[in-house]
């Protein structure tokens, strides 16, 4: 049994594959780090609806939502609990309209996106790529 149970904010993100098989990554306004689009789940919000809403708010894209490909829990630098779920997603267009939360986006080959992102997000891209190839 865990000594200290995790109380966590839930973060939902999508590994978005474009029509040519590229993966969308976005650059945060706050620290200019790269990440997958998505965000926090609202109280009493359905997870599928939450991730689709967050992606639409951040990118303007309407996603075809697939299965979860990765889930991970951690504590951030401030010792706050986080729980992230990453979904396999596809989109039919590449025209992105960024929200104020991001300053830049790129469509990258999956292997390039995997290395650009942090550990759990890179792992999510790797897992989503395997799902895509099935």
Image (cartoon, rainbow, N blue to C red):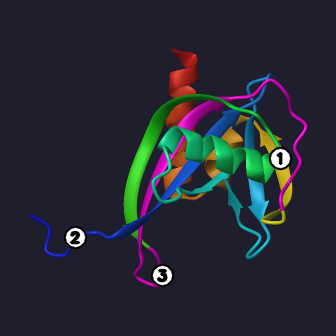
Q: Residues within 10 Å of mark 2 (few under 14, many from 20)?
A: few
Q: Is residue 115 left or right of residue 10?
A: right
Mark 3 = which residue?
A: 77
Where residue 19 appears, as percent x and y from the top left, is 79, 22
Q: How many marks?
A: 3
User: Between residues 99 and 103, which one lies in front from this camera angle?
Assistant: 99
* Residue most extreme to the bottom: 78
Residue closest to the far left: 1
Under circle 3, the secondary element is loop
Residue tagged 2: 5
For label 1, the SS is strand
Which badge, 1 or 3, is on the more N-terminal residue? 3
Alpha carbons under labels 3 and 2: distance apart: 17 Å
Percent of width and height locating residue 70: 44, 42
Q: Using the image, determine if residue 74 lies above or below residue 105.
A: below
Label 3 vs 2, first from the N-terminus: 2
Spatial distance from mark 1 to mark 2, Cα to Cα? 37 Å
- Give the extent of the magenta segment: 76-99
Nearer to us: label 3 or label 2: 2
Q: Is residue 122 above or below residue 109?
A: below
Residue at figure coordinates x 84%, y 65% from the top left? 100
Query: Residue under circle 1?
Result: 106
The magenta stretch spans residue 27: no
Residue drawn where x is 51% and y is 14% of the image: 134
């Amino acid at each position: 049994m865990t000594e200290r149970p995790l109380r966590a904010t839930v973060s939902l993100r999508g590994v978005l594959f474009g029509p040519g098989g590229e993966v969308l990554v976005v650059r945060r306004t706050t620290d200019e780090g790269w990440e997958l689009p998505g965000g926090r789940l609202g109280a009493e919000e359905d997870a599928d609806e939450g991730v689709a809403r967050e992606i639409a708010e951040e990118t303007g894209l309407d996603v075809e939502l697939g299965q979860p490909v990765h889930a991970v829990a951690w504590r951030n630098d401030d010792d706050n609990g986080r729980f992230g779920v990453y979904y396999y997603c596809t989109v039919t267009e590449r025209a992105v309209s960024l929200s104020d939360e991001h300053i830049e986006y790129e469509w990258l080959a999956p292997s390039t996106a995997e290395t650009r992102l942090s550990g759990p997000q890179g792992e999510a891209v790797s897992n989503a790529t395997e799902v895509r190839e099935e």
